[in-house]
Image (tube, helix red, strand yellow):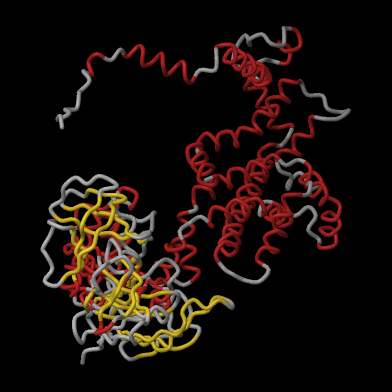
Amino acid sequence: MAEVRLVNLVKAFGRQIAIKGINLVIEDKSFVALVGPSGCGKSTTLRMIAGLETVSWGDIRIGGEVVNDLPSRSRGVAMVFQSYALYPHMSVRANLSFGLRISGEPRAEIDRRVADAVEVLELGPYLDRRPSQLSGGQRQRVAMGRAMVREPRVFLFDEPLSNLDAKLRHQMRAEIKKLHRRIQNTVVYVTHDQVEAMTMADKIVIMRDGRIEQVGSPAEVFRSPANIFVAGFIGAPQMNFFRGRVGPGGAIFVDRIGEPVLAEPGAFVLPAEGEEVILGLRPEHIVPENHGMVPRRSVCFKATVTMSEALGNETLLTAAFGGVEFVARMADPREVEDGETIEFRIDSDRIHLFDPVTEGTLRRVSN
Amino acid sequence: MNRVQPQHLDLSAIDWREVARRKRRLVSGGSWGMWLAVAMALLWMVPFYYLLITIFKSPAEFATGPKLALPEGLWPVVGNVSAAWQAARMGPAFLNSAIYAVTGAASAVIIAAMAAHGLARFDFRGRTALFMTIFAGTVFPLQLYLIPLFFSYQSLGLIDTRLGMILFYTAICIPFPVLVLRNYMSQMSREMDEAARMDGCGEFRLFFSIVLPNASSPMLALFLLQFTWVWNDLLFATVLTQSPELRPIMPALQVFQGGYASQSPTVILTASFLASLPTVLLFLAMRRTFMTGLTAARN
């Protein structure tokens, strides 16, 4: 069993505290993605699990054992680095077997493990090449192979796809996912790319400024973001936010939108009448008239298009009303001129409401 | 909207002479500059030409004929080599030079690599101060060390010993490689070190199995530079050694100098030529590695 448990984990660099006491359970055999903007502490957390950074406070437990003071090699973890970190002076074969050779594994065992990795990752034709003779994707596979042969309890990935082009990234995403299904290890995967996190992970951990903002499945963090930060971070283009006020009967009034938005009954814990709230709407839930499904319950308003970005299958419209800008997705697109006024429909069943002070969600916690 | 078709250029219509002319117009700095450079290069080569033709002349031919004329035959070189070899006792001198240059330069570069790895990778208090102290070794003129070194060596009994010479050359050759290798190693991927640590490397294995092989090009270039410096050193070798059995090649050539020296210039030039031959041959043999090493160290 290789459950990873972080208990009150703190990392300080001098007087600067990078990780501010995080608690997280990463279940055995799960694929967990740590996401967040640059400097949020996700890589530092991973490096502490790897044993490349000391733990300033709190504990890291792998398979129930506290590993704070164990060197990397004794933790049963293997890491795939952003730059692949292959040994340039060694062939692919030597890169794969280096760790096993220095730990004194018997020759037959080394050959067996290397052969397994080579077969899974289809590295056969490249065994005698140096890393400089490989493409980015091939190097990435060698880096994964080097981690695999150690048969670790936990796989750590530190932004492994960020140096690849878009097409290869897509392909490697699928390969890593397949690899996880096949070898069934615990995976901790760090990325700043929320698409990677959403498509690969069983569980996403969203971090900001050394703290965990939300932990949940991809669907959970997308559908029920815990706060404005998560709502804005997960989803591209990001969620639109409008200032509104609570009216009678739980209606939300937004300036310059004539009709009130009626939230799904019972879904939110609303503040008192007259109090301010932040209304969040994803671009796909602001539907341009005649482009996309008409929502079951909706509110109409007009806005002027300031920019349109045609993506082929859809167009992203940036529009404004009363000084407020937002982005909407136009399905089945037509050409739109800048300055054109268009009618939009807000899908009332898909709104998010947040407290403007705490920035937390007002959604009722369902049991 | 009209459909716009991309128009393809007929590539067979390209006039390749015009392509070459355009390139020449862009890169050439004018023919005057070129001729000036050629003239300077020729002027620079006159002493080498003088050396090369003189070693093939007999003392008599050199004394009577025009100095820059081509030699009449090639055989006099044998007599010149033989005279030079015996007069300067070049056999033991070559051996001494080889021992000092190889041992001194190699130990210096390996010690410098270890120091550079430490300075580039370990965070410890006083790291910059330590580096600056080592670096100061390259700043002061070397002659400054001569007198204190002589007296310290005298009190330690290291004057006129092989150990003394090797110790001195090793020490004097360390600072410059530290400077170059520290910069080089700072730019090596830290993730590579970390990957090696995760693979189970301790510090020494990391250094010898991962860092050293990846720094071999600049290390080899530095070895060549330091080898040449030790080989060509006259001053320190003259001061720190006295007996002919321990003297390297450069001070050995001093027999040709002074009031009682009576050898012909053909023999003296032959001795100089022979003395400089090993460094030239070493450079020619390793020039490719030397150039890649220099480029690697610069980048």
Q: Is residue B158 above or below residue A204?
A: above
Q: Is residue A57 above or below residue B235?
A: below
Residue in view at x 46 percent, y 54 percent: B214
Left or right: where B232 falls relative to A266 = right
Q: Is residue B186 above or below residue A362?
A: above
Relative image position of residue B159 (x, y in whole percent): 80, 55
Can residue A251 be spotted in the picture? yes
Q: Residue furthest right?
A: B259
Q: Looking at the image, which is closer to me, B265 or B296?
A: B296
Relative image position of residue B79 (x, y in whole percent): 66, 22
Relative image position of residue A334 (x, y in whole percent): 16, 47
Residue in view at x 21 percent, y 89 percent: A366
Q: Looking at the image, which is closer to me, A57 or B255?
A: A57
Q: Quadrant of residue A25?
A: bottom left
Instruction: Locate the C terminus of chain A and report the quarter of the image it occupies.
Output: bottom left
Q: Looking at the image, which is closer to me, A96 or A78?
A: A78
Q: Is residue A57 above or below residue B203?
A: below
Relative image position of residue A58 (x, y in whole percent): 45, 88
Instruction: Locate the N terminus of chain A and report the quarter of the image it occupies.
Output: bottom left
Q: Looking at the image, which is closer to me, B277 or A191?
A: A191
Q: Quadrant of residue A51?
A: bottom left
Residue in view at x 59 percent, y 54 percent: B109
Residue in view at x 41 percent, y 13 percent: B21
Left or right: where B262 falls relative to B179 = right
Can residue A185 be spotted in the picture? no
Please give the count of numbered marks on the rendered protein. 0
